Amino acid sequence: MNNEEFRKHAHELVDWMADYFDEVEDYPVKPDVKPGDISAQLPDEAPQKPESFEEQIEDFENKIIPGITHWQSPNFMGYFPANTSYPSVLAEMLTATLGAQCMSWLTSPAATELEEQVMEWLRKAIGLPELFTGVIQSTASTSTLCALLMARERISDFKINASGFPTDETYTVYCSSETHSSIEKDVKIAGFGRQNLRTIQVDHEHAMDPKALEESIREDLENGYKPTAVVATIGTTGSTAIDPVKEIGEICARYDIFFHIDAAYAGTALLLPEMRWMNKGIEYADSFVFNPHKWMFTNFDCSAFYVQDEALLVRTFEIMPEYLKTPEDQRVKNYRDWGIPLGRRFRALKLWFVMRSYGIEGLQEKIRQHIRLGQQLKEEIEAHDHFELLAPVPLNTICFRFHPNFIDDKKKLNELNKKLLNQIQESGKIFLTHTKLDGKYTIRIVLGNTNLKQRHVDNAWRLIQDIANKLI
Ligand SMILES: *Cc1c(COP(=O)(O)O)cnc(C)c1O
């Protein structure tokens, strides 16, 4: 491909992209394919000779698109969103074109300095105190891993970095039974050992019970363990439950335990001053993560990780081989020392484009609209004789089940709701997912897509009722 051909194809693809966004809600949101259907259409060997771009695009449309789950469809209401937006996609095109590898200041000064600046913009926009400094990581999973590694090095005075875990000490980590699965993964990777992760019980609203946390810490101390880190969640993945940050923070302060907050999804709602009650006590946190790549219209990957002790973070990760030394090292940030990978994409650009294109007010308006739609649907579900809510709805994630008043058997209700969700998925019209709360099969609907409108919510609720009614 030469420059002229690149220009031609790029223009064609931009037209394809604009058409896609225009039509995405008409696609079946979940593809109708079985495992192996897509790979069966792909050759076993890479081509020996060049193939034309036209052929590649034809295969993309005919073989790949039919196997895509359309996350950008406003009918996608499962998991949590992985939103994009026009400004974010445009920035990703530029990032791909520059292809800058932003591991240190020198390898792209503008990337480092823009990242510093947009993380400050974002910090102020979500009302985080000035105590915090931010850096973009790939995911909430890796941000939390960084937090646990910082905690590990703080309590061991950097001895674990130097010589590994001592055999005569056991370090413990605490989270709630509703915590995201990435915490367990991180605990294993960071070397704590899964058996040293304490799962604290939750209250009737699925939030961590601080009394149970303190009891568990005390018991561990009595038994000679070293309580090292607590991970609290603002907006659990199951039901967006909000752990009591202030109470947990006070406990962490009392026992000198590293305190990390995972607000991967719900952190975006902190753009709204009226939602800042969620992070009351945030000043106790040593670190905080939220994902603009979920609800804040910024393409995956973009995870905003904030820490109070910048020196601890850098000392945990710093490496200085000869070939990476630069004359400016003492005066600049080298983000390779702020996380796990050496190489880094230029991710600040898309966040900059998103924040400038929407403005804080534009972002707030969208998030408020999503929460309003969520609250409205919550009321309709609550008012329906044959449906019930299974968790509080602080934001725009509604946990519910179909519960006709003549069925009371727990197992039957679970089976009925599993069947309901399956049939909803098979319709291809909307995409929902499930969780289990108190042993109950729970259907989740998340109203946070970039282009979500009232009519999508109305259609979804009508479809859920229609399918449910046909089941009984
Ligand atoms: C989605 C989610 C995660 C994982 O996010 P990644 O960026 O995919 O690692 C972690 N915690 C919570 C609460 C989440 O909702």
Image (cartoon, rainbow, N blue to C red):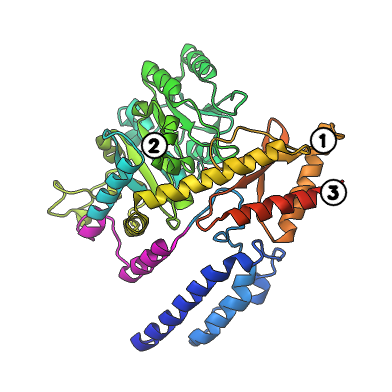
Label 3: element kind: helix
Relative to 237, say whether 155 is above or below. above
Q: Which residue is mark 1?
A: 411
Q: CA distance from mark 2 to mark 1?
A: 42 Å
Query: Which of the 4 image quarters holds residue 33?
Result: bottom right
Q: Which residues are magenta?
A: 84-112
Mark 2 against mark 1, which lies toward the viewer? Answer: 2
The picture places residue 163, in percent across and down from the top left corner, at 35, 34
Mark 3 against mark 1, which lies toward the viewer? Answer: 3
Q: Which residue is mark 3?
A: 471
Relative to 417, say whether 431 is above or below. below
Q: CA distance from mark 3 to mark 1?
A: 16 Å
The picture places residue 161, in percent across and down from the top left corner, at 34, 36
Magenta segment: does it hold 109? yes
Does label 2 or label 1 sit earlier along the sequence?
A: 2
Q: CA distance from mark 3 to mark 2?
A: 43 Å
222 or 38, which is in the foreground?
38
The picture places residue 299, in percent across and down from the top left corner, at 44, 58
Relative to 73, say whether 313 is above or below. above
365 or 96, which is in the foreground?
365
Residue neighbourhood size for the residue with mark 3, other residues' Cα within 10 Å, grouped as few (<14), some (14–19), many (≥20): few
Marks 3 and 1 close (CB-CB < 8 Å): no
Marks 2 and 1 close (CB-CB < 8 Å): no
98 to the left or right of 472: left
Ligand 1 within 8 Å, label 3 CB: no
Relative to 166, say whether 128 is above or below. below
142 to the left or right of 402: left
81 or 451, which is in the foreground?
451
Q: Which residue is mark 2?
A: 273
